[in-house]
Amino acid sequence: MSTSIEKAKASKVKVAFFDFSSCEGCQIELTNLGEEVFTGLLQHLEFVEFREVMTETAKGPIDIAFIEGAFTREADRKRLEDIRARSKTVISFGACASTGGITALKNHMSDYSQCVYGVNSGAPHLASQKSEPISAAIKVDYAIHGCPMDKDEFVYIVSHLLHGKEPVIPNHPVCVECKMRETVCRYSYGHHCMGLVARAGCGAPCPADGIPCEACRGFIEHPNEESLTKVMNERGRMTSERAKNKSRMFTATLRGDAK
Amino acid sequence: MGHQCKSTIENLFMPEEAEIVRAEFMTPAEKHFTLRLKSGKAMVFEPGQMLEVSLFGFGEIPIGFASSPTRKGTFDIVVRSVGRVSSALNRLEKGDSLWVRAPLGKGFDLEKMRGRDVLVVAGGIGLCPTRSLINYILDRRSEFGKFTLFFGTKTPKDQLFREDLAQWRISKNVEFHETVDRADENWKGNVGVITTLFKNTTISPDTVAVICGPPVMYKFVIRDLDRIGIARDRIFVDLERRMKCGVGKCGHCQMNDLYVCMDGPVFPYSKVQDREEAFG
Amino acid sequence: MPVLVQLNCDIRIIKFIYLMLKRPLTSAARGTAMSVYFLKESDLTFFLGRLLASSPVIAPVAKKSKFVFAELGSAAELRLDYDVTLLPPKTAFFPVKQKLLDFGPDGPKSAITPRKQVLFGVHFYDIKGIDMLDQLFAEGHRDNNYLANREATTVVGSSIQKVSSRAFFSTVGTDVQPRGHDAFLTHVTAGYVFETRTPKGEALISFGSFEKATAAQIEEAAGVNAAVLKRCPEKLEHSSELIAVKVRNAFANEELWTDLAKDCFSCGSCNIVCPTCYCFDVQDRWNLDQVSGTRHRTWDACLTNDFSKVSLGAGGSENFRERRGQRFRHRMMRKAAYLNEKLGGPACVGCGRCSAGCVPDIADPVRIINRIVGGRHGSSV
């Protein structure tokens, strides 16, 4: 006869975290959830693999797999396919996994390896190809955007999944959230900002701290790229060339000129 | 509305609990629910009006009444799994509760129909809100003239309310015509789009017509009604869609200057024919 | 009497009667001044301090180089010399995110919890915005989630000391007078003329060292409020009636709207900062226990891509205003035409927030309308 605690444990949703080309900052960000939220989640979730906090690794079936990092090596495909085969739901976790993120900047450069690794650039473990989102290798059900991912949104999305509800992911730009919290627009200082085309959902913390939005959550659907170059040039005091390149930081795989 | 509200101030977003007394999938995506207010009070509404149906945590969606107010005690809705709320609702079974705010919107203009011939043209799930009117007419048959019903679906599998259809096929109280776009091996009836049914009957120019179905259907049905000579203020269209708050505030259902949830969902065609946003 | 003059007279009378009729009954008491007082410049801080001790006071304060309405911590934070705030003061009754109800195993519980508060220092154009929301939330189904907060609030207007760079409040909806305030404060040479308009406004008198205003002070205040109208940097050049007709008639001019919206980001900033916008989205959220939770509404913006999108199942969807130009047009129709009959004038108060908040600077109603209607700043289309 099983105790009620065992029953509860048996019905908990099995969650695992995996990382690919990334800084693992999104997993670290989870440790900032705070004790109350974390223990609250543990009432409903059972972590079966989470390299940042535990040594066990999952071999069996997984309910929700969170995959951090970009797909940059063909050699990773097999591991990704294995995760997919064992997981009911796969979620790309953070900017690198969802859009390629910062790692995709190299797609537009030929000498990045030399620049970054210098004399060691030829080491075999540093070899990689074009950086792509995880969805380039396997089917991804949902994306948690952001660099790092937003921890409140993580809880919100997990809550949806626990109830079998499709997560609500905003498709409006960061401007909406800046205006809502009465942040003085970067453009009114003569600065640039990508918030005009960047997917909201983060609560727009960067412009509120005086930092322009870098679109770490990727683009909204139908971003007006032409108009963006124009305002960054005319109101953000950038040269046209700089304005064009500027928007690449987190959106290299999303732009009209994606490689 | 708002009986659960402990505050003395009425909250128009406060729903009432309704118990599911019957729940049955009519197709893999469409589920027919028969409901009763938990408070024991009767649901007072008119054919064509709507409800906001909700499940806490999932949200709220607008749905037309699928039953006639002449049939007391319970009321019906049909939920089609298309989004977060509807998919969650369709996991509910008999004995479960859901939450409703109703009645909302303007229903069919029954005064305009009384004493006249009535034609209802329903495509697909357009049969659900029009069923509130169809059964109303059947229950008060003597108040109306000739009653004709067209029902079309893509395939025979998509047909809804099969028990009703079986009755209507043999009823003397309604001239029932049905069609499918694509037949299967068992289908013996008409094949073709819904307007191909016009050739099987005679509709008088004095008829009041009601249309509810997918957006593409309206244009073609109206072309035939024009040909017959039915005045456009006697053609009613049910444009039940994209509502959120249901009470004329949130702005989501607005098409040009009209609010579907306040001015409709039933409109005389003459009122919406020039509104570009009405038919997408 | 010549027929023409007679006719003109009749039209004026009809218009007057119409204007009187469309005033909501609830604000009948707000029509005329009750009493006019004077407060010395040096006594304002004392008055506000006492007011603050009795209830929260929401008033303009500085935020970096701009201004916002916020709850005052002390009287010293008040900035009556503000030009315009980033968001309109509607936030005091209709916050960006508002809880509608709590839910849990025992069912739902209403979240209407009004608190008594004073909204202080509102410019007349924003009072007009509040009037419009009062009417729109009360018509048809009464939305007490807004109205209860509204009724618990005492609104004190303020004369405009500085005019913002995009304002055009002197030439928009000139037939529509501000009504929804309980008192009005005008800055004059020696202090403030304080006009009470409702018993709620009159009740404020006990908090300060008010004296009866002199005829000269009242006259000076009237002059101050009249003079500010001449200082608007932007101007509409036609009547609201003509603008409404012309804008409506331009509906089918697809080329115009596509061109106007060419640089539009669909970012919704023009909606969010607007004092007369009130669209919202409703969402549920579970608490950490995954059993209880809240249903809340959040401001929404019809310029954003997903505003008029509906799900059709199987991942499909339909968007009723799919193109940028269609959404851009919808906003102008709402501001200049659709609501005019209901409101007695356009759903715009000339604050200029949308013009200032639009990064590509294409949202300015003055430029759009002057282009459509024709005028010094643009050719007729």
Image (cartoon, rainbow, N blue to C red):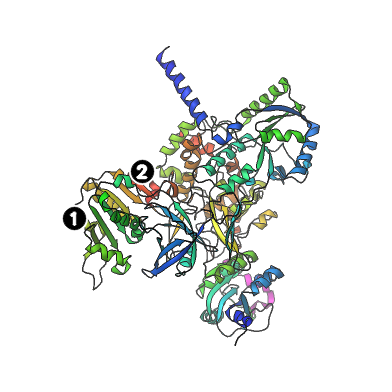
Residue A55: mark in rendering: none
Looking at the image, is C173 positioned above or below residue B161? above
Q: Residue furthest bottom?
A: A1
Q: Residues within 10 Å of mark 1 (few under 14, many from 20)?
A: few
Q: Secondary structure at mark 1?
A: loop
Which residues fall within the magenta stretch? A105-122
Quick check: can you spot residue B56?
yes
Residue B175: where, in percent of width, then height?
A: 22, 57
Q: Main secondary structure of the magenta part?
A: helix
Chain under numbered label 1: B
Determine the CA span between mark 1 and mark 2: 28 Å
Looking at the image, is B214 positioned above or below residue A164? above
Queried whether the magenta region covers residue A117, the answer comes back as: yes
Chain under numbered label 2: B
Q: Where does label 1 land, which residue?
A: B201
The image quadrant where one finds the C terminus of chain C is top left
Residue C113: where, in percent of width, then height?
A: 64, 51
Q: Secondary structure at mark 2?
A: helix
Quarter of the view holding residue C190:
top right
Q: Where does label 2 land, which residue?
A: B271
First reached walking from the N terminus: tag 1 or tag 2: 1
Residue type, label 1: Thr
